[in-house]
């Protein structure tokens, strides 16, 4: 085998190995959940910045979230597992973060311009971290369908 062929094969092999090596240290899974401890921590930052104003700093939502307001919109529901958020798949939750809650009867603005897909997953990990194991298991049965 000539030098050029060996060089190309070696370069390809190194590139393939580099693609398999994660950036940074491994993340710590949360037992029985899809997300990691690090995702929860990262998700708290955008949650507090963009979501807590309406949904509460602990995801508690508003008191009358089941009743429409004077404009016919639903107020911000709890995200801590005590409302209907666990009825929605990850896909629907991401879409709601990106596109807002207007299509669902709410008034939540779209955050797709300021929260990218990875950050949206981190935000979801953060508020799912507030859920009890029972609520998470119920959500998982819906997500798995």
Image: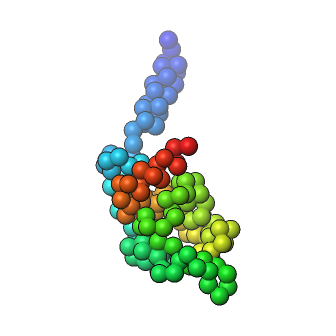
84 displayed left or right of 106: left
Q: Residue at x 53, y 54 (%)?
A: 90
Exactly how many numbered labels are in the figure?
Answer: 0
Query: Horizontal and vertical percent for residue 139?
Result: 47, 53
Query: Horizontal and vertical percent for residue 124?
Result: 46, 60
Query: Quarter of the image holding residue 89?
Result: bottom right
Q: Residue at x 58, y 79 (%)?
A: 67
Query: Horizontal and vertical percent for residue 122?
Result: 44, 59
Query: Quarter of the image holding residue 117?
Result: bottom right
**Residue in the foreground of this view, choosing between 130 and 141:** 141
Residue 95 sits above or below residue 19 on the image: below
Residue 94 sits above or below residue 54 on the image: above
Toward the bottom, the furthest residue is 70
Q: Residue at x 43, y 35 (%)?
A: 20
56 displayed left or right of 114: left
Query: Horizontal and vertical percent for residue 41?
Result: 35, 62
**Residue in the foreground of this view, choosing between 23 and 71:** 71
């Amino acid at each position: 085998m000539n030098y050029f062929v060996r060089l190309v094969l070696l370069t390809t092999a190194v590139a393939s190995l580099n693609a398999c090596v994660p950036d940074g240290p491994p993340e710590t899974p949360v037992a029985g959940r899809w997300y990691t401890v690090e995702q929860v921590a990262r998700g708290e930052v955008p949650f507090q910045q963009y979501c807590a104003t309406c949904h509460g700093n602990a995801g508690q939502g508003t008191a009358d979230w089941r009743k429409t307001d004077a404009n016919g919109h639903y107020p911000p529901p709890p995200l801590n597992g005590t409302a209907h958020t666990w009825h929605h798949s990850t896909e629907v939750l991401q879409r709601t973060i990106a596109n807002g809650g207007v299509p669902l009867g709410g008034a939540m603005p779209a955050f797709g311009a300021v929260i990218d897909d990875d950050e949206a997953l981190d935000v979801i990990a953060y508020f799912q971290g507030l859920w009890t194991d029972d609520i998470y298991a119920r959500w998982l049965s819906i997500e798995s369908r």
